Amino acid sequence: MLDNQGRNIRYLRLSVTDRCNFRCRYCMPAEGVCKREHSEMLSFEELTEIVRAAVSLGVSKVRLTGGEPLVRRGIVDLCRSLRAINGVRELAMTTNGALLPQYAAELKQAGVDRLNISLDTLNKDKFASLTRGGSLADTLAGLDAARHAGFRGTKLNAVLLGGVNEDEIPALAQLAQDGEFEVRFIELMPIGECADWPRERFLSADAVLHALPELQRLPNEGVAERYRMPGWKGKIGLIRPMSHRFCADCDRIRVTADGRLKPCLHSAQEIPLRGLHGENLERALREGMFGKPVSHHMQSGQPSESRRGMSQIGG
């Protein structure tokens, strides 16, 4: 499926819940999201139907997001159902890792191929502050559980926060040394809770190159610039939505947990999918994919146009 710019849309990020067991400062209000009725969220049957329709239009990679996807009851059963869809070549999940000790082995058995685990700091006090009560020990235990369950190529996502974790860039990067993980540094975006944060919080990914001058450039993987450190087995990735806009290479769409298609994370455009079936569902997906915006406008200093925060989108 090609959009209006000739981009091949192959990647669906599917939010299964807007709830989370953390309250990360850049993602969610301190009081959490406004709780919605279970009936307002897409059922497993609806989620599966949307994935089938997207696959029929050329999507081959599906990533489950939240909120925190592991707080959704029955998540392993959903993974098993999605993995059984002919045409899903990769099933992935983004998680904060805290519940992986309970779920990692089951997720692997259900057919999840890859995990991305959020990890912004290795300082337990800073971790508790950033997540408003989360435990670094729980997330580190989740990393171990993922490894023991047989997950390979796990990516650790660290959001760059000026004045908060820039001093930890070398320590976070070192988690890639033995090849168990790829560490990816992501530029903070002015969306949701952090849209009005002071500019010094928004750190360019160039800070990673300054902190690790020995890094050697590799070919890009999707929207990520990739590097290697001499002698290390793992890779370092930089994701630059702010300093080096990658919209021309973006091949993804998003569906929110309440059933709205977002062709672009930062656009206010949302296309309702709930209640659509068969040809009507495919038509709505096709029109949304084809009309994907050319780019965002955050480089000009404007905040994201999205009316929702990250936890409500599954970004």
Image (cartoon, rainbow, N blue to C red):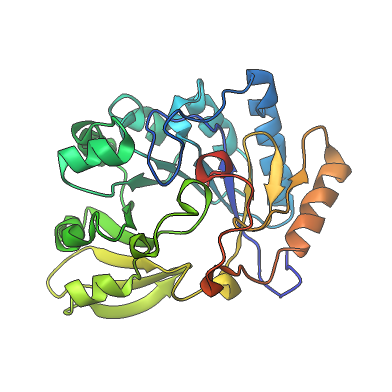
Q: Position of residue 184 (x, y in %)?
A: 32, 60
Residue 288 visible from this viewpoint? yes
Residue 58's image quarter?
bottom right
Reply above or below: 20 against 168. above
Residue 247's image quarter?
bottom right
* In this picture, residue 146 sits left or right of residue 68: left
Q: Position of residue 193 (x, y in %)?
A: 48, 46
* In this picture, residue 212 sits left or right of residue 256: left
Q: Position of residue 22 (x, y in %)?
A: 37, 32
Residue drawn at x 28%, y 36% as measured from the top left = 149
Q: Position of residue 181 (x, y in %)?
A: 25, 54
Residue drawn at x 54%, y 51% as measured from the top left = 89
Residue 163's image quarter?
bottom left
Residue drawn at x 87%, y 43% as measured from the top left = 280
Reply above or below: 183 against 43. below
* In this picture, residue 228 sits left or right of residue 190: left
Reply above or below: 43 against 129. above
Residue 176 visible from this viewpoint? no
